[in-house]
Structures are given as structure tokens and as C-alpha cells.
């Protein structure tokens, strides 16, 4: 009887000990979970005054990045040159960039990979009444910047009319507002510009001859450094979850609900609001490898990117994981 009682007492001690251990561990487990939830991820990203950066600006303003636990250092750049300098100096983890710029990064051993396509577009505008189509640009003076995305788009666009860049006259005009003014005053016959300058130019009376979206010539992408994709993948995924929320916001709301962002961040004006036609925003997805191949082949022909490469070298599979 005493042995049985002793056994029951010992069993009770064991059970209490186990329960006590569980009770001790449970708050610790909750504490760890809370700690993980509170642990904020960090990322830096370079955006441009362009329509393809709009979802990023919206996500920042609406707090979507914070909702995903991401502390985003969002930096805005007026020129690709400044953005590229920030990338190469280590001040950015990723950026809104383009395929030609990205090929130049890789030529300089800056490992930036394409994670998603973006909706940036270029247009060819003219103020010359005798220019009705792209084929009419033969022998005409066009203002743009060489060895950059606008020239790549122009080369692809006029190729559809069996022309090359040798068939047109190049005029170096770095500043886009100046290009618009020169085209309007017919000092040059045409120019290549992105939004909002396409709408600004059309509102000023210029005619659009070609648009990269309509011709399915993709040039702009979002890229992140290779080491960031390896070591900070959770933060990049959080970035894209917030991006997709912003896309839903744009598609569900009216232009009035976010036009202030277009004015402040992209350079739109109240005067052109009635003429604005934004691209169709979709959830983030990787660009077609065919677009990358064509852009990099052109880049090689221009002497920008001369190294061997594969899709795996330059394109991230993050969004398919």
C-alpha cells in the first residue's frame, strides 16, 4: 500500500514537473514569436520620376511596406546617372532601372539581377507636320541620348519599318524638357520621351508616332543586387507583397485618389490631368526572357555589354518561388 502511495506521489511529481516545464516554455515561445513579428526587415530602393515607380510611391504613402514589416528606405532620383551611382556605391539594394542600364552594371561587375518587369514606356513624338509615320523620319533629326534605353527603343521601333539608326540624324539633347521644347519649335524633327513627358508633349500639340507598350518593346525593370536576394530574400518578398497591394489600390481607386502622388513624385501637372492615360498595372511578375535577350544583344552591338551570360545570371526566380 505504501509502495503504491509512493508510486502515485512520484507520478504526480513527474506530471507537475512536465506541466511546469510546458508552462515555463509557453511564455518563452510567445516571446520569441512576438520578437520575430516585431523584428523589422530593412531594404533600400531607388525610384525614378516615372509611372513604373508609382506603385512603390503609393505603397510608401499608404503604409503597405510597414504593414509587411518592412522598413523601406525609399530614395527618389531625378536622373539615371545619380541612381546608378547610388547602386554602385552601395547606397541601394535595388532600383527601378532598365535593361540597357542593367547590362552596363553587369559589364562593370555590379551584380544586379532582374526580379520583375515594370510598366515604363517610351514614345516617339514629332512636331513636324510632314512626318506622319516612323518611316517619314528617314534623314530627319531626332533628339535623344545614345547608348541608353531611349535609343534602344528607337532602334527597335524604326526596325519595324526596315530602318536603322544610320537612317536618322542624331541630336544629343540630355534634358527631356528641352527635347520637348526643341521638338515643338521644330528645331529637331522628333524626340524620344517617357511619361509624363509624352502627355505633356501631346497636350502641347505634338503627335505620337510610336509607343513602346503598343509595340511590345519592354525596356524597364526592377532589379536587386544578387547578395540582397540571397541574404535578405524575406525583405524583397515583403517589398513585392506591398507592391501588389499598391497595384490593387491603383486599379480599385480613381485617378483623383492618388493624382497628388503623380504630381509630387512623377512630375505630372494639374493642366494635363484630363489627358492622362496610365498603363495597366498588374501584380509583379518576371519579364519575358526574350525581351532581355534582345536588349542585351543590342547592348553587345553597342559595345556596352560584351560578356557571356545566361538567363540564370541576370534573371531572379524569386517571384516564382
Image: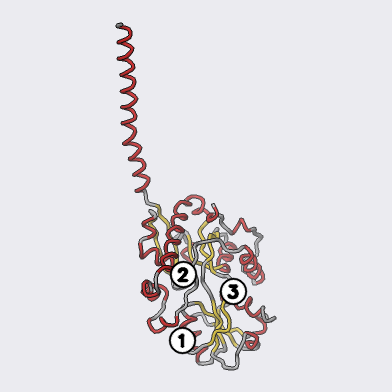
Q: Position of residue 298 (x, y in %)?
A: 65, 70
Q: Residue at x 42, y 82 (%)?
A: 274
Q: Nearer the viewer, mark 3 or mark 1?
A: 1
204 up-or-down from 245: above or below: below
Q: Which residue is mark 1?
A: 203
Q: How is the image coloured?
A: secondary structure
Could you tell which of marks 3 and 1 lies nearer the N-terminus?
A: 3
In the picture, the disc for residue 80 is: none
**Separation (CA) of disc 2 from disc 1:** 29 Å
**Residue at the limit of the structure toward the right, as seen here:** 162
Q: Position of residue 184 (x, y in %)?
A: 50, 90
Horizontal side of residue 25 vs 150, given as left or right: left
Q: Which residue is mark 2?
A: 82
Decide if residue 84 is in sight here: no
- Bin the neighbour count of mark 2 within 10 Å (Cα to Cα): few under 14, some 14-19, many 20 and up: few
Decide if residue 109 is in sight here: yes
Q: Position of residue 212 (x, y in %)?
A: 57, 75
Q: Secondary structure at mark 3?
A: loop
Q: Which residue is mark 3?
A: 147
Could you tell which of marks 2 and 1 lies nearer the N-terminus?
A: 2
Quarter-wise, where is residue 168 in the image? bottom right
How many discs mark residues in the rendered view? Answer: 3
Could you tell which of marks 3 and 2 lies nearer the N-terminus?
A: 2
Quarter-wise, where is residue 4 in the image? top left
Q: Nearer the viewer, mark 2 or mark 1?
A: 1
**Separation (CA) of disc 3 from disc 1:** 28 Å
Q: Secondary structure at mark 1?
A: helix
Quarter containing the N terminus: top left
Q: Position of residue 96 (x, y in %)?
A: 49, 66
Amino acid at each position: 500500500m505504501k509502495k503504491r502511495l509512493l508510486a502515485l506521489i512520484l507520478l504526480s511529481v513527474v506530471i507537475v514537473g512536465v506541466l511546469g516545464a510546458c508552462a515555463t516554455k509557453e511564455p518563452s515561445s510567445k516571446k520569441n514569436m512576438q520578437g520575430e513579428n516585431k523584428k523589422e526587415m530593412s531594404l533600400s530602393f531607388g525610384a525614378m520620376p516615372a509611372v513604373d515607380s508609382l506603385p512603390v510611391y503609393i505603397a510608401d504613402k499608404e503604409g503597405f511596406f510597414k504593414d509587411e514589416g518592412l522598413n523601406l528606405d525609399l530614395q527618389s532620383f531625378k536622373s539615371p546617372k545619380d541612381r546608378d551611382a547610388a547602386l554602385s556605391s552601395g547606397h541601394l539594394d535595388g532600383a527601378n532601372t532598365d535593361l540597357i542600364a542593367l547590362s552596363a552594371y553587369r559589364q562593370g561587375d555590379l551584380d544586379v539581377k532582374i526580379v520583375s518587369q515594370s510598366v515604363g514606356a517610351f514614345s516617339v513624338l514629332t512636331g513636324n507636320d510632314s512626318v506622319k509615320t516612323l518611316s517619314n523620319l528617314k534623314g530627319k533629326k531626332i533628339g535623344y541620348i545614345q547608348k541608353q534605353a531611349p535609343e534602344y527603343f528607337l532602334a527597335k521601333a524604326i526596325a519595324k519599318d526596315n530602318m536603322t539608326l544610320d537612317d536618322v540624324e542624331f541630336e544629343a539633347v540630355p534634358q527631356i524638357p528641352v527635347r520637348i521644347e526643341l521638338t515643338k519649335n521644330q528645331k529637331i524633327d522628333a524626340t524620344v520621351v517617357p511619361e509624363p513627358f509624352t502627355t505633356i508633349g501631346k497636350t502641347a500639340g505634338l503627335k505620337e508616332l510610336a509607343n513602346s507598350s503598343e509595340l511590345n518593346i519592354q525596356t524597364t525593370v526592377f532589379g536587386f543586387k544578387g547578395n540582397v536576394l540571397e541574404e535578405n530574400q524575406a525583405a524583397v518578398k515583403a517589398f513585392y507583397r506591398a507592391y501588389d497591394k499598391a497595384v490593387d489600390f491603383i486599379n480599385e481607386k480613381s485617378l483623383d485618389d492618388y493624382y497628388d502622388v503623380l504630381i509630387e513624385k512623377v512630375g505630372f501637372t494639374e493642366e494635363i490631368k484630363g489627358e492622362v492615360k496610365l498603363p495597366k498595372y498588374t501584380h509583379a511578375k518576371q519579364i519575358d526572357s526574350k525581351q532581355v535577350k534582345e536588349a542585351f544583344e543590342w547592348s553587345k552591338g553597342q559595345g556596352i555589354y560584351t560578356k557571356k551570360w545566361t538567363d540564370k545570371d541576370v534573371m531572379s526566380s524569386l517571384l516564382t518561388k
